[in-house]
Amino acid sequence: GDASLVTHALARDELSRLREKDTEQVEFRKGLVRLGHLCGYEIIDGRMETEYVEIETPLTTTMGERVTGLDDVVIVNVLRAATPFVEGLLKAFPRARQGVISASRDESTGMNEDGQFPISVDYVKLPDIEPDDTVIVADPMLATGSTMSAVLEHITDQGADPDGLIVLSAVAAPPGIVRVADSFPEVDLLTVAIDDELNEEGFIVPGLGDAGDRAFR
Ligand code: HSX
């Protein structure tokens, strides 16, 4: 399994601020929004096409260039940490249709021997997904991959073609990348950073702590 990295230096700059333990709630949330915005540009640059179209300026007719498929984007918000991240993505894809999935790790019994957490999925509301849609599944953290695997199952069950799926994270750990890539080989994994490891509690190290808590508390 493999993941591609967001290449823009500003994305790494924003992520480094998010990692800082002293970055407090408001700055953390704004940073996630800016990071989502940059990731949206990265997706447009590397994964979408442009087409030449005739346009009329106030003076003359000329050729303009438009990004193809901006009207066929679905963004899935994996509650809750993804909310500010998705707000940033929407600046790049203002007309995207949105889905929401509430999925969370049950941490009461710790990580299973197979390195996974049981996931409870409490709420799923997805728009209709068409074969040509670019579907971006956003969650800032990909740790064990348990959450994302459960989310992707729901999305593909509702008819989404795995070939059109982009899993976008800010920080990913190797076990999560491997788990998602093994279960959904066609999915395009995109992340700002691949971190070293998971600790015994299933937290990404060095990571940035609990993104949901830091953005919401
Ligand atoms: C955090 O844990 C993140 O926002 C994700 O939703 C989840 C990632 O952990 P894992 O399921 O990959 O281990 O709440």
Image (spheres, rainbow, N blue to C red):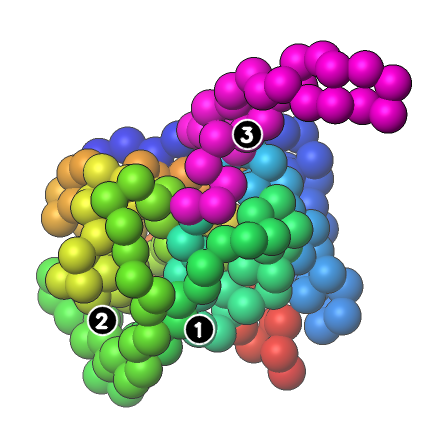
Q: What is the crowding at mark 1: few (fewer than 14 residues within 10 Å), some, or many (at least 20)?
A: some
Instruction: Give the number of the disc on residue 117.
Output: 2
Does the magenta-highlighted stretch encompass residue 51? yes
Of tags 3 and 1, the one toward the viewer is 3
Residue ID for mark 3: 67
Of tags 1 and 2, the one toward the viewer is 1
Nearest the camera: 128 or 74? 128
Residue ID for mark 1: 79
Q: In the image, residue 165 lies at what x, y percent?
A: 30, 45
Does the magenta-highlighted stretch encompass residue 132? no
Residue at 48% x, 74% y is 80
Question: Disc 2, ligand 1: is the CB inside 8 Å?
Answer: yes
Residue at 81% x, 15% y is 60
Residue at 24% x, 44% y is 131
Alpha-carbon span between mark 1 and mark 2: 17 Å
Under mark 1, the amino acid is Leu
Under mark 3, the amino acid is Val
Q: In the image, residue 117 lies at what x, y percent?
A: 22, 71
Describe the element under mark 1 as helix, strand or loop.
strand
Q: Is residue 122 above or below residue 89?
A: below
Residue at 37% x, 43% y is 134
| Residue 12 lies in quadrant | top right
Question: Which quadrant of the figure contains the N terminus?
Answer: top left
